[in-house]
Image (tube, rainbow, N blue to C red):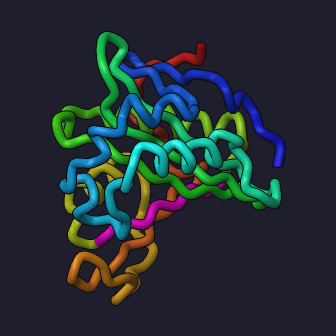
Amino acid sequence: MRLIAADTTLETPRLLLEPLVVSHAAAIYEQLLDQRVYQFIPTDPPTSLQVLETRYRALSSRLSPDKQEAWLNWVVRLRDGGYVGTLEATVYPNHSAAIAYLIFPPFWRQGYAKEGCVRLLAHLLQAYEVNIVVAEIDTRNVASIGLIETLGFERISTKMNADFFKGAVSHEHRYERVSSSTSLPNIPFTSI
């Protein structure tokens, strides 16, 4: 897999998407301890700053160990302030990608996830020539479902009993966005 602009900060009107590096662990560790972040995902908060730094060290290589996948991760920061969340994409050799996003609770419902995801999708479509993007979402996560649908994703399937975490069964919708489908919402952006 060839990395393209992997160390480039992506911009939107309100946000900077900074390529993930180890030092980001200390910057967002406290926000990642908020239990609300993990309500619909089968992971838990990091057990220590050192564990998070180790994870980010591995991710900052931007390639899977076999070098077949691009592991693209950004920390999302307000242009005039602190960090609001993270974005990630895994790009596969067949020109498909999977995305995920995490916005810290104090910044929910302010449009940051949409703005960041629009920029992420544009980057995947232009730089990596991705032709299909996938998102898998817990069926209980109404806000995330609404976001992904506004970005032109279509529900393809629902996997019942996809997971069991935090004492409950999780069902999961699979959404796909084909590059030739609806255009992205108009949010101006650049790269720096």
- In this view, the residue in front, 91 or 187, is 91
* Main secondary structure along the magenta-highlighted residues: strand
Residue 88 horizontal side relative to residue 64, left or right: left
Residue 114 is at least partly visible in this image: no
Q: Between 61 and 30, which is closer to the camera in this rendering?
A: 30
Snapshot quadrant of residue 94: bottom right
Residue 177 appears anywhere in the view: yes
Name which residue lies at 44% across and 71% down: 174
Which quadrant of the view contains residue 133?
bottom right
Residue 71 locus on image (x, y percent)? 65, 49
Q: Quadrant of residue 15?
A: top left
- Residue at screen point 30% across, 15% down: 81
- Please report the residue visible at 21 percent of the width from the left and 49 percent of the height from the top: 34
- Above or below — where is 24 with respect to 88? above
Q: Which residues are magenta?
A: 131-138
150 left or right of 108?
right
Rendered-image quadrant of the C terminus: top right
- Tell how many labels: 0
Q: In the figure, 89 relative to 21: above or below?
A: below
Q: Position of residue 164 (x, y in %)?
A: 32, 84
- Residue 183 percent coordinates (x, y): 48, 40
- Is residue 18 shown left or right of residue 143? right
Image spot of residue 156 (x, y percent): 45, 73
- Establish if 125 lies above or below 7: below
Q: Is residue 31 magenta?
A: no
Looking at this view, is 151 or 182 the one in front? Answer: 151
Q: Is residue 134 magenta?
A: yes
